[in-house]
Amino acid sequence: MCRWLVGRPRQESHPRSFTKPHATSPAAIGLRCRRDIDTDNWARPGLTKLCCFPPRSQSPVTRHRGGPSQNASSGRHPIMYNSGAGEALLLHGDLDLTIHEARGLPNMDLLSTFLRRLCLCPPGMAASRGRPAASSRSMPDDKSTHHRHHHHHLHGLHRHHERQPHGHLLHATSDPYAAVVVPAGPHHETTLARTYVFRNSEAPKWEASFLLPLAHRTARLDFHVKDADPFGSDLIGTASLHAADILATAGKPDRSEWCLNLARPDGRGRRPMPLPGSTIRISARFVPAARIPAFWRSGSGGVPAYFPPRRGCDVRLYQDAHVAAGELDGVPGVFEPGRCWEDLCLAVLGAQHLVYVAGWSVYTKVRLLREAMSLEMTAKAAEVMALGGAAVEKMSLGDLLKYKSQEGVRVLLLVWDDKTSHDNFFLRTRGVMQTHDEETKKFFKHSSVICALSPRYPSSKLSMVKQKVVGTLFTHHQKCVLIDTPASSDSAHRRITAFLGGLDLCAGRYDTPGHSLFRGLDTVFHGDVRNPTFGGGAAAEGPRQPWHDMHCRLDGPAAYDVLTNFEQRWRKATKLREVFGKASHRRKDDSLLKLERISWILSPSAAGGATDDEQRALHALPEGDPECWHAQVFRSVDAGSVKRFPRPWERAEMERRHLLCDKNLAVEQSIHTAYVAAIRAAERFVYIENQYFIGSSYAWPSNGHPGAANLVPMELALKVAGKIRAGEPFAAYVVMPMWPEGDPRSAPAQEILFWQSQTMEMMYRVIAAEIDDKGLKDAHPQQFLNFYCLGNREPPPEEVGGGDDPAAMARRHRRFMVYVHSKGMIVDDEYVIVGSANINQRSLAGSRDTEIAVGAYQPHQAGRRPRGKVFGYRMSLWEEHLGKEVVRQWPEAVRRPESRECVALVNGVARENWERYTDDTGRAGELRGHLMRYPVLVGADGSVGVLPGHETFPDVGGRILGSPNNLPDYLTM
């Protein structure tokens, strides 16, 4: 067993300091009965009135995931527990946790109470109002916590919203909430979850449940109880639970329950001071990751998410914006690379009712068609010309959308509103991110196209400081287009088709697998030559920044989930403002088509209901078809960005929708859940392409940090370590950009590179420790995990210019990186995730950037050696990266990514390409494909250092390992 994973055996030389309540006196456990609580109503046999908790029959355990706990009616008492020191153990799995309630909390609002009594209470009444909110009379019951809000669901239904639970209405006391925390060092901690705020109570009953994925080596979990204030929170007390006791619940049929004593740190590093009578009650059950079956192989269908898994779908996978016929072989008879932007243009031209676009950036001047068109596209272009339209191949995106709106198609654009961009009489700025949002809005101003600029709305439930942070730093990062298309070739019905993934409809995104640097600057890329590394006029001379991406087309029931996401966001962005509302807002808010009223458009309500079994009319392919897909839509989003999320205290709806309660904010982070679940289910290999790779910061070797707590890197490292321990072949491949977009010498880029190098070293050290424990003397971490980047180099011209600036050097050497903007993962050639989410905290937290993705597999291809569309897609990507010759020469090795032969082949090509890329003599020649090693040196012990002779990036400079600085972590993580 890896010593990193487990540590030393737990010492049991002294008994743990907890016993059953009936055998413990108040003095022994540091509790006392509160005289101002009616303890006779709360006591039960065996507790001796110490806990002051209600009988079990009055406090059932309600979980957000799964059914009620079996302990709820067992009659067993919670364990009174005092936390002491413990050995660090690996918690790797899912923790099904419920935080029930707290008792005996101190009043943290004493000043407010004094002022209220002084100003509002007549003499003699203050004493009568000084009682804490601990009795049942002060707690809201089921009847008093409901009132009607006449909001509509997507299909015209009404919802009843529960009022936020509270204690006294006139007596000011604490507003407590609880947080689950993993200690990550003397000054850092990772917050896993937070309950909602229980207003004005010293005895809050949250009954908040969480299903928490864990991949942490720790001695304990901490539970912080805090008092919420508008400008922050004050710590009331903290309690701890040993990791060993959490692991002991694995395999048990019932949940274990603890009553933890709260203590308060004194702020000087000394032992926390007990809070007499203050306790928190929790229950939990731990499920190890090894016992969680692969959801696509076990028949469970999907992962816990807002949208359930859908059957009967069809998925088409794309690489780059355009792949010309014959440019890649693909897998004959299995997978043929598609033409993403051409297929999108064809679908828009064929739309009869709606075109909905949601994007981080939508640029009206971009052209979708630039090269030879397919026969189908050529026929459609001729049809448009015959009807008096313009030449389709010369249309810009803005002209195309205007053309469709003039035909009567409802065209809606939902574009992120960059707060740093302005276009008015007093101020005109392009904005920091240069997304052209103001230009897009102005272009459609006097047309029938409705364009809504949507800022990243912070939830009003956040503190005032966090509202400013969210609204300023975070974005709407989703990229999707929804179009009505023919349901079938022999039917007059229409259905909804969704395009989603990493490709923005904006400048610089069009590219092909050739990823040219200088070729086509005056033809294919005319007017769209972009290179943010250089900027200004230097970029127009080349090299252009090549762009690699992943995208998909989705048909069937899952496409309607993408539509629901758009409608929820549209309603939020265009909601009628009570004070500053305008007629334009009313028009936008009422502009969504009501599909249930259009009989010839298939919709969930028209299909008979919301469940998959009742919607077979929506299926794009029959379930018995070998080409059929099962698909599930995932998101990173919170209640500040969508309409009609439940409130965090509406437990039944939160459970049904698998939403996470983060204080008073309902959050969906199902993209993170999907990545974790898919990696845990991997048997042979994991292949990732992503714009960033930052996470699991709690385990970073030299800078343990709470800012990037997502589990993806740690889960991948633990998967590799587990396979080494089991002696089973496994490999992980990660492709990312050589440096973040922009100048690699800039402070943001350097900090991102530093976070990435920390993430890489953390993973390699986990793997190296397992290799050492296994006694594999000749093994190296890079036999199991490797990082790559993409680049290109073209033959030099006859005349080479001078200059020492980065742009001139790149032109002289005719080389530049291929920017990897993909956001996808392939597991075992069976399961694929494609979307807009990066692997960093911004994209995976759910409460930062808004994201969308889809996870899909073909059930008829689930097996040991699948040869379906996911396999074909991965082979086509590798053909682009490795080159046709490599794939044709070693087909068997490339078909088995987990094999030592394949890892050696890919690493050999990557090293050779890096040597050719960095050669300054001009005799190295062109690269084989575009895949290169990521330029770092990995030691046998997992250390990550400078590759000799390559401390900085060629031509452009900037330290490859990066360097930390004082920028806000929110910005770069």
Image: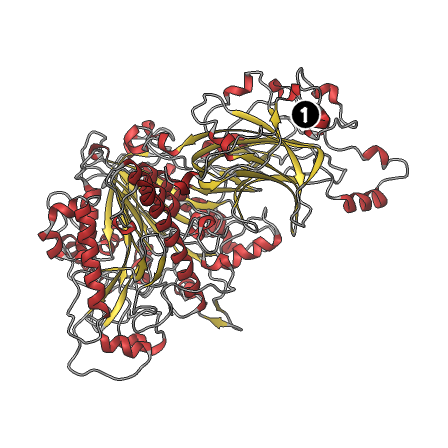
In this rendering, would 892 be left or right of 860? left
Picture coordinates of residue 497, whole percent (x, y):
29, 44
Q: Nearer the viewer, residue 110 or 776?
A: 776
Residue 326 visible in the picture: no
Q: Which residue is mark 1?
A: 51
Given the image, on which type of amino acid does mark 1 rest? Cys
Picture coordinates of residue 331, whole percent (x, y):
13, 47
Identity of the residue drawn at 19% across and 76% down: 921
Picture coordinates of residue 316, whole percent (x, y):
23, 45
In this rendering, would 860 be left or right of 233? left
Q: Secondary structure at mark 1?
A: loop
Residue 318 visible in the picture: yes
Identity of the residue drawn at 85% across and 45% down: 118
Picture coordinates of residue 407, whole percent (x, y):
30, 54
Q: Nearer the viewer, residue 184 or 108?
A: 184
In this rendering, would 493 be left or right of 336? right
Q: Nearer the viewer, residue 22 or 65?
A: 22
